Image (cartoon, helix red, strand yellow):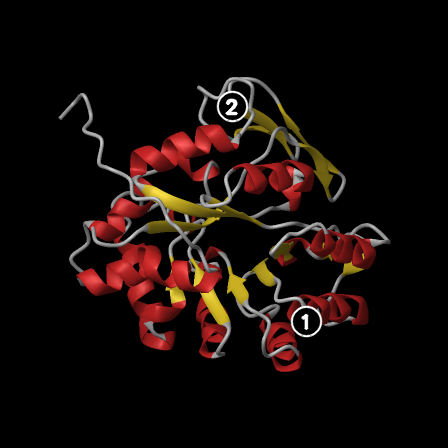
Amino acid sequence: MDFNIIDAHAHLWLNQNTEVNGLEIKTLDDGKSLFMGEIRQMVPPFIVDGRNTAEIFLANMNYAQVSAAVITQEYIDGLQNAYLNQVEEKYPNRFLCCGMFDVRQPNYVKHAKKLIGHGFKALKIPAQRFFLPEGRVYLTIDPMMEIFKQMEKNDILLSIDLADGDEQVAEMNEIIKECPNLRIAVGHFGMVTRPKWQEQIKLALNKNVMIESGGITWLFNDEFYPFEGAVRAIKEAADLVGMDKLMWGSDYPRTITAITYRMSYDFVVKSDLLNDEEKALFLGKNAEKFYRFKNLIDLPYIKNMSE
């Protein structure tokens, strides 16, 4: 391949120790976690201590020839800001790390501004978690708009996952109108297997909005490899907004409990539904430009023992 592969949606954490809507999430052993009342295989079982570190991910990236990755966050993993600050400082050409504030805390505007001051070039908002027991947090309330305007002023990228369908699309359109220079990456490919997913994709008709496919293999898990339905969805999204608005994301590490990290993108490489230029744009070129990666590493193919 004559381009660098970039993962636009991955996660790192040292441990999970949090709660969402009063339900505990906690790292156990052998890659398992207590997750909202049940035991789930959160990461592959060989990660026996549950520590989903940058070094383990880099080993997977190097093997799969992925040059760089965007590290997002999610409330189900707990805030990982301190660790991700260290990761980006240690591996500046391999990772772009998103800071994350918590709207469930009363001082979240102050926290968001503090993250910007600490040097985070991107902030993550898991907006699908904004439907709280005490009431919904709208993206367009004054405190949130204050954060978005501060991000736009400081050229801080917004990585955001939305609730299913068009539930939060009108709010996003208002944000885009008020902050036209705010760069936005919409995650989970618009929750592609849910009704009205195309409405999230259409947000990318705006100049500074992109769509990334983190979690697409999870969303098409019932179909499983080689995820032909996912490729057809990529084609449909490209028809709506153009292939230059779409980016690959793996949702590592949760997705690699079912498939290998390389499999999370090589179903695109091996598909005959996309041409070579479309594959290059989707798997790397779009993300390299949008996230402003520089000095990307070229990685050799390592032959497997089974070959």
Residue appearing at x 32%, y 63% in the figure: 234
Residue 289 locus on image (x, y percent): 41, 63
Residue 11 visible at all: yes
Q: How many numbered circles does the render carry?
A: 2
Label 2 vs 1, first from the N-terminus:
2
Instruction: Please give left or right for residue 232 compared with residue 173 in the image.
Output: left
Dot 2: within a 10 Å radius of its alpha carbon, few (fewer than 14), some, or many (20 or more) residues?
Answer: many
Is 262 above or below relative to 143? above
| Residue 32 quadrant | top right
Nearer to the camera, 116 or 225 = 116
| Front residue of 202 and 166 | 202
Residue 269 relative to residue 43: left or right:
left
Point 72% across, 52% down: residue: 115
Q: Position of residue 291 (x, y in %)?
A: 47, 59
The answer to whether 50 appears left or right of 99 in the picture is left
Circle 1 sits in a helix, a strand or a loop, which is it? helix
- Which of labels 2 and 1 is toward the front? 1
Label 1 amino acid?
A: Lys
Q: Which residue is mark 1?
A: 153
Residue 31 has which mark? 2
Q: Quadrant of the C terminus?
A: top left
Residue ranking furthest to the bottom: 177
Q: Residue 183: x, y in percent?
A: 55, 68
Indicate whether 185 appears above or below 239: above
Q: Residue at x 46, y 60 (%)?
A: 292
Amino acid tagged 2: Gly
Residue sitting farthest toward the left:
307
Q: Is residue 161 visible?
A: no
Neighbour tally class for label 1: few under 14, some 14-19, many 20 plus, Cα within 10 Å: few
State how far apart marks 2 and 1 are (Cα).
41 Å
Q: Secondary structure at mark 2?
A: loop
Say left or right for 62 vs 116. left
